[in-house]
Structures are given as structure tokens and as C-alpha cells.
Image (cartoon, helix red, strand yellow):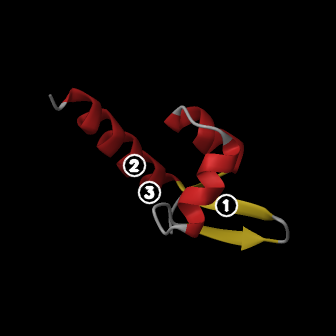
Amino acid sequence: MGNKITVTAAAALLGVTPQRVRHMIKAGILQAEKFGRDWQIDAESVENRRKAMEQKKREP
């Protein structure tokens, strides 16, 4: 994993709640590692998900 971001930062980038980000981690949609009680999310996986969400919005 490359650069890592917090749940809060990922939520802001994706336009969802932190709870939804945690759900995406558990579902395997986002790549992340847990350090203590905090998740560190792979920034590239967040960017890939953001692009996929934007693409889905554009489809008729």
C-alpha cells in the first residue's frame, strides 16, 4: 500500500459518511489496515472508488 489516509479524509473525498467508509473497508471495496483502533486507508483505492462512483453517475 502506498499513501494512507484517514477514514474522515476518505469520507470527505467520496462524499459519504465515515460509517459508510468503514462499511466499504469491511466489504473489501477499500484497501485498509487497522492500527490500534484507527483505519489507515490506501489513497489509491479511495481514488479508484471515487472514479467508479463518478462513472456510475454519468451512465444513463
Q: Secondary structure at mark 3?
A: helix
Q: Secondary structure at mark 1?
A: strand
Sequence-first disc among 1 and 3: 1
The answer to the question of whether label 1 and label 2 lie on touching residues, with beta carbons closer than 8 A, is: no
The answer to whether residue 57 is above or below residue 30 is above
Q: Nearer the viewer, mark 1 or mark 2?
A: 2
The residue at which mark 2 appears reads as: 49
The residue at which mark 1 appears reads as: 40
Crowding at mark 3 (Cα within 10 Å: few <14, some 14-19, many 20+): some
Q: Is residue 41 left or right of residue 34?
A: left
Q: Is residue 43 left or right of residue 19?
A: left
The residue closer to the viewer here, 3 or 21, is 21
Crowding at mark 1 (Cα within 10 Å: few <14, some 14-19, many 20+): some
Q: Amino acid at mark 3?
A: Ser
Residue shown at 35%/40% (left/top)? 53
CA distance separating discs 1 and 2: 16 Å
The residue at which mark 3 appears reads as: 45
The answer to the question of whether label 2 and label 3 lie on touching residues, with beta carbons closer than 8 A, is: yes
The answer to whether residue 19 is above or below residue 30 is above
Q: Amino acid at mark 1?
A: Gln
Q: State the image coordinates of residue 46 (x, y, percent, origin top left).
A: 47, 50
